[in-house]
Image (tube, rainbow, N blue to C red):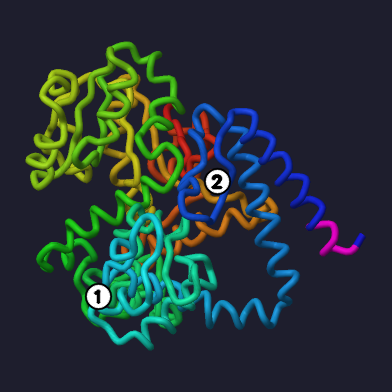
Amino acid sequence: MAELVKLAKELLRHAEQLESQLKEIQAPEPSLEAGGPAMYPDSVRYPEIYKSREAVADKSKRLLQLSAGPADTLRAIAGPERSKLAMCSVVDHFDIHNAVPQTGSISFSDLAKKINVQQGILERVMRFGFSFCLFKEEPVGHVKHSALSQAFSQLRGWLHWMARKDSALAFQAWPRAVEVYTDDPKPGVRCMPYNIGNEHNNAFFDALIAEPGAMDKFAEAMKCVSSASGGQDGTIYAQAYDWDALDEGPVVDLGGGKGHLSLAIAKAHPKLRFMVQDLPSNEEPFNQAIPEDMKSRIKYQVHDFFKPQPESVGAKVFFMKWVMHDWPDRDCSAILKNLVPEVERGAKILIIDKILPDPASKLTGYDDYALFADLLMWTVLNGCERNVEQFKALLKMTDERLRILSVNRPPGCELGFVEVGF
């Protein structure tokens, strides 16, 4: 059977399965029309829906490439695909998603006056957006929301961040960064794309701290990324691990920032106690984020995870979400070594990060985001995402006794759970 027809039939089978699953729970069908669902149903309750969705996405991407052909696929990457982020930047800059009414439509003439731009160029830019369903032209000469444009607010922080000049320059520096890359750079020398592209030697977060408002914008971008993945309210993290087996804990949230994840888990498991450890700069935001009625169960402790743990609190689990991927192996090993004495006392380590596909496995069209995330970490921090074997190698270089006890990636969740102990 020809590959094109085979893929089309597989896509139809998975699409019909997905449609059936959504009907079974009376969930709205996927739609690009205004009012269409921005996300799929709760992945914790309906994991099979997310498995079907991943299969549909995989077959769709492969079918698109096959139908376009190799040359036009590459041409699209350099042309319209690249320009879609620029289009989103225009929407962000002029607040167009809020200027267009949520119901009905607005004429190009009125929209141009509302955002104070020339109508002709507005029409040209907007019609490019129409081509990938970011807004609709309905009726002719008018702009109307689509499901994508209505979801824009949810992802605005992330889209804004990725379109920043320093981000763009960092990605453009990939060739040079590959050329000079080394696992063991000289002290004080940074060879990641962010520094090469922006022609300075400042660490990423140091540069943000020096720029007024940049840390707040970065936090908003991270919030957007989290909200767009499964379990945006923390539910999936509260259900994907046997927290109840820990009784009252305590649990230490290493590098936990404002404590949002600890709060979500604590709400779902009312016996558990938490200690959020992070730098002094996060203590006041933590105090503002945690409700008063939860502060008896969720405490804050100023601590740098590159230093030995303070006096043992008898933690049963130390968990780290989006921590390990920020650092190369030598730094991650240093973080883990500081936890080894606690593991000797019986504690477990829970790493919550993306888990890259095994190199021996067949990559799907749904793996591209995880692989992009790996290179994004390298681009700005010289960090990385890891597959299971890379996690094992990291544990071995830290302490021969450390081993992976379990690995779990819940359906619909972009992150996996790697449980570590002796």
Q: Residue at x 40, y 75 (%)?
A: 87
- Secondary structure of the residue carrying tag 2 is helix
Which residues are drawn in magenta?
Answer: 2-7
The x and y percentages for residue 42 are 48, 33
Q: Above or below — where is 68 with respect to 220?
A: below
- Secondary structure of the residue carrying tag 1 is helix
Q: Residue at x 59, y 28 (%)?
A: 25
Q: Is residue 408 rendered to the left or right of residue 210?
A: right
The x and y percentages for residue 240 are 46, 28
Query: Residue 389 shows which numbered tag?
Result: 2
The kind of residue tagged 2 is: Glu
Residue 12 in sight here: yes
Label 1 to label 2: alpha-carbon separation: 52 Å
Instruction: Decide which of 121, 264 is in the foreground and name it.
Output: 121
Q: Residue at x 25, y 19 (%)?
A: 250
Q: Which residue is mark 1?
A: 115
Quarter of the image for the N terminus: give it: bottom right
**Nearer-N-terminus badge (1/2):** 1
The kind of residue tagged 1 is: Ile
Q: Above or below — where is 215 with respect to 336?
A: below
Residue 180 in sight here: no
